[in-house]
Amino acid sequence: GMGGIGKTTVAKAIFNKYQDKFAGKSFLASVREVRLVDSQNTLLHDVLRSRNINVSKVDEGTEDIKRRLGNLRVLVIVDDVDSVKQLEALAIKRDSFGPGSRIIITTRDKHLLEILKADRICHLPAMNKEEALELLSRRAFNMNYPMEGYFELAREVVDYCGGLPLALKDL
């Protein structure tokens, strides 16, 4: 889905709700902004709960992930992916981890998920005007509706943001 639609927020909610059901877990935030070896180290540290791991080369990290995590039941969220190279470096494939594992990828590029042959692709729709007005009101007025005298302005802001939650929160 498009930027600001709430992909990361939904992924965080899923992670927080289900993380305790897995032997290992990792939420890799903003992967497109992080060096590949840093993402690899984060994944290994999170799942293995060990700081004694230090990958210095991408190829070495990919092999380390396959070898050390291949049999574990894990929950891995890979957030804000923008290239197949990132997924390959993290050894993200259908059979990368142990049985019962779940991998959730957020991206603006549906094609990446198709290349990966994802089991399921979920598109987040923009909020409708009522939902957007409620979100804006909660953030601006700590109420489910606009404060008296601000209804028209709130409607204009909602129209301007086009149902994007991040834009509504920022404004």
Image (cartoon, rainbow, N blue to C red):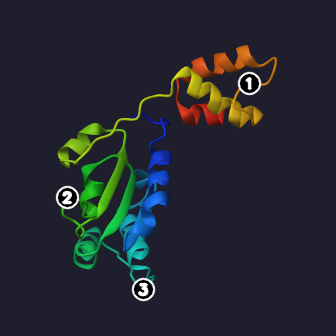
The image quarter in which residue 70 lies: bottom left
| Position above or below: 50 against 98 | below
Q: Earlier in the sequence, mark 1 or mark 2?
A: 2
Alpha-carbon neighbours of circle 2 within 10 Å: few (<14), some, or many (≥20)? few
Type of residue at label 1? Pro
Residue that appears at 81% across and 17% down: 149
Q: Quadrant of the C terminus?
A: top right
Alpha-carbon neighbours of circle 1 within 10 Å: few (<14), some, or many (≥20)? many
Residue that appears at 81% across and 20% down: 148
SS assignment at label 3: loop
SS assignment at label 2: loop
Q: Earlier in the sequence, mark 3 or mark 1?
A: 3
Alpha-carbon neighbours of circle 3 within 10 Å: few (<14), some, or many (≥20)? few
The image quarter in which residue 102 lies: bottom left
Location of mark 2 (residue):
94
Give yes or no for contact between labels 1 and 2 (Cβ–Cβ under 8 Å). no
Query: Would you say 20 lies left or right of 155 here?
Result: left
Q: Quadrant of the N terminus?
A: top left
Residue that appears at 22% across and 65% down: 96
Type of residue at label 2? Arg
Location of mark 3 (residue):
52
